[in-house]
């Protein structure tokens, strides 16, 4: 996809389609009024007939209008007018309008789409973030699920060029945002492709090969893959316990992005991203209920997000050192599988009593977090579809953020708010860790239903002493079920914003 800026008159813009906004009371936005004058008020006359209600996200395509160079004009509903014209439209309304315009273009043979939509104020959306959001939204809207259907595939859309109408002053910043948004869209698409694949295709070995292929494409990336013998040498007893019931061999991925200018940021200490990679979670001996068990192919969404984010980082060649760690395996109920009551020893030397084999994500992550120590990181962030309890607590709108450092938690929440990939800071006080006491081991892997997402984070916290660490529980945000089943690509936008801020912190 090609992204461009147009800083001249709208009527002279020669594209397949020009999108402008209309309020739900029929009032044209300033950009639409400019076109209306050149078209002898045809737009306003058509709107006054009442055929177009201009509800937020609604579109209406007009063709062959005199007085302008664009072949089509797309009217996009932006809902009610803001009480204060100084405030402009909200970010939510603007994002919906952009997505609606791109979506409408894909239902035609439009190859070049120009966006002359009212924008939020620069206080709400800077020029750079505007460019990033346009590229991100276009990528998200144009994404098609990588299905394995045998029938004829739908015809591909023709859209290959998106033009943003803006001032000359904003041009450079918006262009920089385009680069960031394109990288974000590329990384998020990779995450979604991996997560949408079935567990019999996207195995731990498949994830490893995907990472190795990335390293062949980007010079800044180095990949090391640990197989079963190497995992055993690392004494990752919790990780090994989860994988022992599966015929699929486990893989532990180490993906490193190194940049020569990273020394300027915390003396080159890396940011470490850790992803849960359960490529299928049956629950093990503590077998899950059959309904929606198919969705457990998404239980590697944390791993997919790490791999996709590393691709975006490499495309932008961020001046940071970043390490991605992925613990990948299946959780299956074989005769060799771990059982409730078994006790295993983690790589950190702490013993864990397995009370529920379906609480396996924290077991593979605790060994991955211990492995992260060797990089002497400035910060560690893990992401995992860890608990159903976080969905009960927050629904599907916010990612749960837990941390042993309140400043880091606030930073992540602020990053999510800035890019509309929202998160919520959850508590993580010592009382929750005390609920994990065991009569027979250093700790149990579960602590009952109450506060389930918090006690899961408290389990991980026991392995993060002396680390600056945050945990993202993405069980409610990384994918959706039902008729729209599929990966959402979250929290890719939040993570990239976090890394971009870190890259500019000298």
Image (cartoon, grey):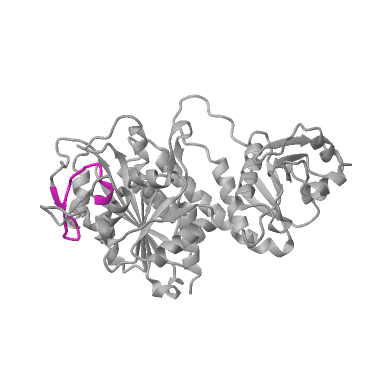
Residues 404 and 185: in front is: 404
- Which residue occupies 59% across, 46% down? 138
User: Measured from the top left, where is residue 145 in percent x and y?
Assistant: 49, 36
Residue occupying the far top of the picture: 151
- Which residue occupies 48% across, 71% down? 505
Does the magenta segment cover residue 350? yes
Instruction: Count the labels in the image.
Output: 0
- Which residue occupies 47% across, 46% down? 397
Residue occupying the far left of the picture: 440
Does the magenta segment cover residue 263? no
- Which residue occupies 24% across, 46% down? 448
User: Measured from the top left, where is residue 329 in percent x and y?
Assistant: 27, 44
User: Measured from the top left, where is residue 149 in percent x and y?
Assistant: 46, 27
Image check: 461 left or right of 141? Answer: left
Image check: 475 left or right of 354? Answer: right
Q: Quadrant of residue 281?
A: top left
Q: Bounds of the magenta span?
A: 343-363
Image check: 282 left or right of 416? Answer: left
Residues 274 and 464: in front is: 464
User: Measured from the top left, where is residue 411 in percent x and y?
Assistant: 45, 64
Q: Is residue 407 visible?
A: yes
Q: Is residue 314 visible?
A: no
């Amino acid at each position: 996809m090609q992204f461009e800026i147009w800083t001249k008159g709208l009527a002279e813009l020669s594209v397949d389609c020009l999108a402008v906004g209309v309020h739900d009371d029929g009032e044209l936005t300033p950009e639409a009024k400019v076109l209306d004058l050149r078209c002898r008020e045809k737009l306003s006359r058509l709107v006054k007939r009442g055929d177009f209600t201009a509800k937020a996200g609604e579109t209406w395509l007009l063709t062959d209008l005199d007085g302008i160079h664009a072949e089509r004009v797309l009217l996009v509903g932006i809902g009610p007018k803001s009480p204060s014209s100084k405030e402009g439209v909200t970010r939510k309304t603007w994002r919906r309008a952009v997505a609606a315009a791109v979506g409408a273009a894909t239902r035609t043979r439009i190859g070049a789409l120009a966006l002359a939509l009212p924008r939020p104020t620069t206080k709400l959306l800077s020029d750079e973030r505007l460019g990033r959001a346009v590229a991100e939204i276009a990528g998200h809207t144009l994404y098609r699920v990588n299905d394995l259907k045998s029938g004829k595939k739908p015809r591909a859309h023709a859209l290959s060029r998106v033009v943003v109408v803006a001032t000359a002053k904003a041009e450079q910043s918006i262009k920089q945002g385009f680069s960031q948004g394109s990288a974000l869209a590329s990384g998020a698409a990779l995450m979604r492709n991996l997560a949408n694949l079935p567990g019999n295709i996207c195995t731990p070995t498949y994830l490893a090969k995907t990472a190795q292929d990335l390293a062949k494409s980007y010079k800044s990336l180095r990949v090391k893959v640990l197989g079963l013998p190497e995992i055993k040498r690392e004494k990752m007893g919790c990780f090994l316990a989860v994988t022992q019931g599966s015929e699929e061999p486990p893989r532990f991925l180490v993906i490193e992005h190194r940049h020569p200018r990273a020394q300027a940021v915390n003396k080159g200490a890396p940011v470490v991203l850790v992803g849960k990679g359960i490529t299928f979670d049956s629950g093990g001996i503590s077998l899950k209920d059959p309904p929606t068990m198919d969705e457990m192919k998404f239980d590697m969404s944390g791993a997919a997000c790490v791999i996709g984010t590393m691709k975006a980082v490499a495309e932008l060649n961020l001046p940071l050192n970043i390490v991605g760690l992925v613990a990948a395996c299946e959780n299956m109920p074989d005769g060799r599988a771990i059982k409730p009551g078994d006790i295993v020893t983690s790589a950190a030397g702490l013993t864990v009593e397995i009370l529920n084999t379906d609480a396996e994500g924290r077991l593979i992550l605790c060994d991955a977090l211990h492995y992260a120590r060797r990089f002497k990181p400035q910060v560690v962030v893990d992401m995992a579809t860890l608990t159903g309890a976080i969905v009960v607590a927050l629904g599907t709108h916010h990612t749960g953020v837990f941390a042993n450092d309140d400043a880091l938690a606030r930073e992540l929440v602020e990053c999510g708010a800035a890019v509309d990939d929202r998160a919520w800071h959850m508590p993580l006080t010592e009382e929750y860790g005390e609920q994990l006491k065991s009569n027979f081991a250093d700790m149990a892997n579960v602590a009952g239903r109450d506060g389930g997402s918090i006690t899961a984070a408290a389990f991980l916290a026991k392995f993060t002493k002396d680390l600056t660490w945050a945990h993202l529980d993405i069980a409610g945000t990384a994918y959706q079920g039902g008729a729209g089943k599929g990966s959402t690509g979250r929290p890719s936008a939040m993570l990239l914003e976090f890394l971009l801020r870190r890259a500019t912190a000298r």
